[in-house]
Amino acid sequence: MNKRPPLSLIAAFFVAGLAVSPGHAQAPVPCEDMLKDLRAKMTTAKLSDADKAKVQALEAKGVERCNADDDKRANEFFTQALKVLGN
């Protein structure tokens, strides 16, 4: 005799699987692309000397992380620099 599990049990496993699945996460942007965007926006930005120094320091830190294949941390530095630029 074939016993089938109750439908409620199947539904519970299905819902539990959805709860722990990562979903459709967006792929991270390569740090090289973020760096291109940052440098393009730096050419048109009107910054004070202090803000320019801050952006250059963040860019240098980002490039260092990008060269180490640490795209996540590099992009964090580039994002901070873009915020200083007003983007």
Image: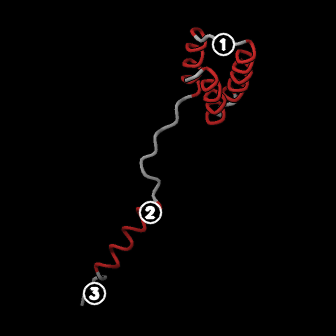
Please identify the quadrant where the N terminus is shown: bottom left
Q: Which residue is mark 3?
A: 3
Res. 4 image quadrant: bottom left
Q: Could you tell me the amino acid type at mark 3?
A: Lys
Q: Residue 69 falls in which quadrant of the image?
A: top right
Q: Indicate the amino acid at tag 1.
A: Leu
At horizontal 47% and vertical 61% (from top left) the residue drawn is 20
Residue at the image position 74 percent from the left and 21 percent from the top:
57
The residue lying toward the viewer, choosing from 68 and 50, is 50
Q: What residue would you read off at disc 1?
A: 47
Helix, strand or loop status at disc 1: loop
Under tag 3, what secondary structure? loop
* SS for dot 2: helix
Q: Residue at x 39, y 72 (%)?
A: 13
Q: Is residue 67 left or right of residue 11?
A: right
Instruction: Specify the label residue 19 is tagged with.
Output: 2
Q: CA distance from mark 3 to mark 2?
A: 27 Å
Residue 65, position as x, y percentages in the image: 70, 29
Q: Nearer the viewer, mark 1 or mark 3?
A: 1
Q: Residue furthest front?
A: 48
